[in-house]
Image (cartoon, grey):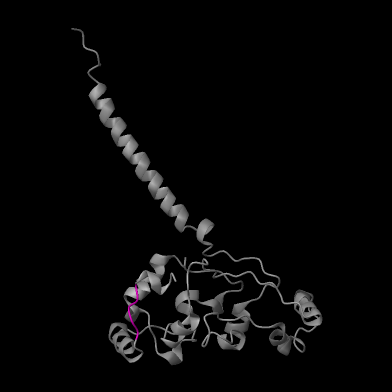
Amino acid sequence: MAQIFHHSSNSLAKISIVAVLLLLGGTVWAAYKINAGSFITDVGVAREQPVPFSHKHHVGDDGIDCRYCHTSVETSSFAGLPPTETCMGCHSQIWANAELLEPVRASFRTGKSLEWTRIHDLPDFVYFNHSIHVNKGIGCATCHGRVDQMPLTYKVNTLYMQWCIECHRNPAQFVRPRDQVFSMTYQYPENQSELGARLVKEYKIQSLTDCVTCHR
């Protein structure tokens, strides 16, 4: 009987199988990279705002504390946004006629709040409480990055669940003294493992990884 398949068919079959596996692996890798990239996560992307507010100027240059504008960050799940009156407390005297600040003055005149675009916006099915994290010694910069160096605000972390879980599994790695929570220049010491373990015990921090912790 004549041979049905050419003697090279075995090699072609093996090459085809390897090619398919490489294609599938490449597709999975590309999907992972796209999902973790700025196109999806908005990490490193400054969003358009009604006023180009500079944390670098207000926090880094002028030394304004986070709590001056985000007044409820220590007591509420929401950090809070400053009312226009807070802005005008300074800008009725400083740069009072600057064209850039006309939306702020218009808001003050009309009583209509500025519509800021949220940078750190979690899905509705995720529960997050600022106050518990602040009072347990998690610094602003741990999640939000060095906002004191940002002319325009952007995300530095994806806020994906795996990123949150990394801290929840090992809080001693990220906790700092409460009096340093709002410090933008705080540096973790070389003995962070020792200090963190002590603070975890002192602040009664639990390693909460149950689904119901965030998905309520």
Tell me: residue 111, above or below residue 25. below
Residue at 51 percent across and 61 percent down: it is 41
Q: How many marks?
A: 0
Q: Check the image and report above or below for 203 versus 163.
A: below
Visible residue check, residue 145: no
Residue drawn at (45%, 92%) of the image: 179
Q: Position of residue 21 (x, y in %)?
A: 32, 39
Instruction: Tell me the chief SS of the magenta region.
Output: loop
Image coordinates of residue 84 in percent, x first then y, are 71, 82
Q: Find the residue positioned furthest to the top.
A: 1
Q: For the view shown, which residue lies furthest in the front direction?
A: 216
Q: Left of 117 or right of it: where is 134?
A: left
**Residue drawn at x 60%, y 78% as measured from the top left:** 55
Which residue occupies the extreme left position in the image? 1
* Residue 149 sits in quarter: bottom right
* Camera-nearest residue between 128 and 106: 128
Residue 169 percent across, percent down from the top left: 32, 74
Task: Name the quadrant of the C terminus.
Answer: bottom left
Residue at image location 81% in from the left, 81% down from the top? 109
**Hey, which quadrant is residue 163 in on the image?**
bottom left
Give the answer, above or below, for where 122 lies relative to 22.
Answer: below
Q: Tell whether position 207 is magenta.
A: yes
> Where does the image place residue 81, in percent across and percent down from the top left?
62, 80
Q: Which residues are magenta?
A: 205-209
The reply, left or right, for residue 126 in relation to residue 152 is left
The N terminus is located in which quarter? top left
The answer to whether residue 4 shows anywhere in this view is yes
